[in-house]
Image (cartoon, rainbow, N blue to C red):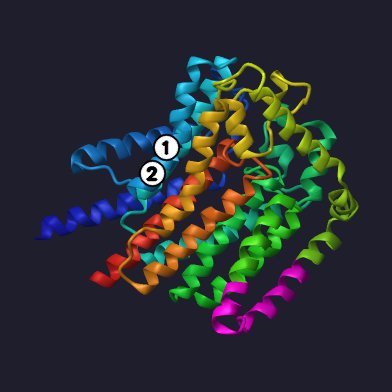
């Protein structure tokens, strides 16, 4: 009995160390100016994921099973990787497609790693982890704005990745992150954490801290100036608020205080950052919106001009059109560009099934249902964000998306397991 207890304790400690290491690298995935294969730089996250994936694979063999959280959700998350593999048959640029396959594969690996290394954690620890991650992300971004900070973008990004003063101006004008990158990617991760933190509050974990975290996250999203993410947030949370008003006839008492907190923090960012105030008027300009619509039209036009299967995963829009952009800035049109109308539509419809499949996960308890709704809301936000940006493209961003979904599924399972015990 003592031997069994020691063995279990050893496994718990090992998983705890791996989880801490994984979190550390996930938060600070510095890029090294060391080119390899078709990448110009090397992220420390890549070899770490490779090593942890090997550990998960060996552990799964010993257990005789692979933990995927939910089979249907995992199938949908696998589809972008599978479609990218198939697109090698018709891609216009094998190097770019191989690069996208590696990036998609890293995201799937991160999902499986998250399920494995956090499998021994209780629901309370998982919710606390989500709250701590939210604060660490926001504080890391804030510290990067301090003059002479070691987290300044000039020090954390590879030198050749900086687009002169234009990159730095955009970084400082809109709340961004020294590792996740410019504001759109940062805002996507932050807004996906909001429903998970709020659900954690609903199940009774750190309720006051969770409430403060939600306010800080919403304010941080507003400070990013990411219009697509802000609109998605207002749409989804607005509909949920109206539904609550319809069902109960009242709104949460803390809502109005939260709104004042969000407005105050957002105004403080504009006041403390001269670049943000100067850049604010430009966010109201239609020029950028026109450029996005030009990219949308170009992507559809390419699909009608002799590319029935698309141009291949990872290939830029500028390679086949006069629009000199790498991304279409719409995940669904990006799918059509890469995989053709048939393949793109199938993949896009599958993506929209993801929040519904999460919502359909069978839960045994009210707390499990609350968390399930939180995870489904998080994924639904991503689906709306994908209308204005291709959130699946960024290498570190995609890893974060898959880790957040993995943590959410794990929390749903843990809540039901706790009640069963």
Res 415 quadrant in image: bottom left
Say whether residue 172 is magenta: no
Q: Indicate the secondary structure of the residue bearing disc 2.
A: helix
Q: Is residue 25 visible in this depiction of the protein?
A: no
Residue 16: percent from left, percent from top: 36, 53
Q: Are marks 2 and 1 in contact (CB under 8 Å)?
A: yes
Residue 43: percent from left, percent from top: 55, 33
Q: Is residue 229 left or right of residue 411?
A: right
Q: Is residue 70 left or right of residue 235?
A: left
Residue closer to the observer: 109 or 94: 94
The dot on residue 74 is 2
The dot on residue 78 is 1
Q: Considering only vertical position in the picture, is 241 above or below 218?
A: below
Residue 160: percent from left, percent from top: 72, 26
Residue 212: percent from left, percent from top: 61, 72
Q: Indicate the secondary structure of the residue bearing disc 1.
A: helix
């Amino acid at each position: 009995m003592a031997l069994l207890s020691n063995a279990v304790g050893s496994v718990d400690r090992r998983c705890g160390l791996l989880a801490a290491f994984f979190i550390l690298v996930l938060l600070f995935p510095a890029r090294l100016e060391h080119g390899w294969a078709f990448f110009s730089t090397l992220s420390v996250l890549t070899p770490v994921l490779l090593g942890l994936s090997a550990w998960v694979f060996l552990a799964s063999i010993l257990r005789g099973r692979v933990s995927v959280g939910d089979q249907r959700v995992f199938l949908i998350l696998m589809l972008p990787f599978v479609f990218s593999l198939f697109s090698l048959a018709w891609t216009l640029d094998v190097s770019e497609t191989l690069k996208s396959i590696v990036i998609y594969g890293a995201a799937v690996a991160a999902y499986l790693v998250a399920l494995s290394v956090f499998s021994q954690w209780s629901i309370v620890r998982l919710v606390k982890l989500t709250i701590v991650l939210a604060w660490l992300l926001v504080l890391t971004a804030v510290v990067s704005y301090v003059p002479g900070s070691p987290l300044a973008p000039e020090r954390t990004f590879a030198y050749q990745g900086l687009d002169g003063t234009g990159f730095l101006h955009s970084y400082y004008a809109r709340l961004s992150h020294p590792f996740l990158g410019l504001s759109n990617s940062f805002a996507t991760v932050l807004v996906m954490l909001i429903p998970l933190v709020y659900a954690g509050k609903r199940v009774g974990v750190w309720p006051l801290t969770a409430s403060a975290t939600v306010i800080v996250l919403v304010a941080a999203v507003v400070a990013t100036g990411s219009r697509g993410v802000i609109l998605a947030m207002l749409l989804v949370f607005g509909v949920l608020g109206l539904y609550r008003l319809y069902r109960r006839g009242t709104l949460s008492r803390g809502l109005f205080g939260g709104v004042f907190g969000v407005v105050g923090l957002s105004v403080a960012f504009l006041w403390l950052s001269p670049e943000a105030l100067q850049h604010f008027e430009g966010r109201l300009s239609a020029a950028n919106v026109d450029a996005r619509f030009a990219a949308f039209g170009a992507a559809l036009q390419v699909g009608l001009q002799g590319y029935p299967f698309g141009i291949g995963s990872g290939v830029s829009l500028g390679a086949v059109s006069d629009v000199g952009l790498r991304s279409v800035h719409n995940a669904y049109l990006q799918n059509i560009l890469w995989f053709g109308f048939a393949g793109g539509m199938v993949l896009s419809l599958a993506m929209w099934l993801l929040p519904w499949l999460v919502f359909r996960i069978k839960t045994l308890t009210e707390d499990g249902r609350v968390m399930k709704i939180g995870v489904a809301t998080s994924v639904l936000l991503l689906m709306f964000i994908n209308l204005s940006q291709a959130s699946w493209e960024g290498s570190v961003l995609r890893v974060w998306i898959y880790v957040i979904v993995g943590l959410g599924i794990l929390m749903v399972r843990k809540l039901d397991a706790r009640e069963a015990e």
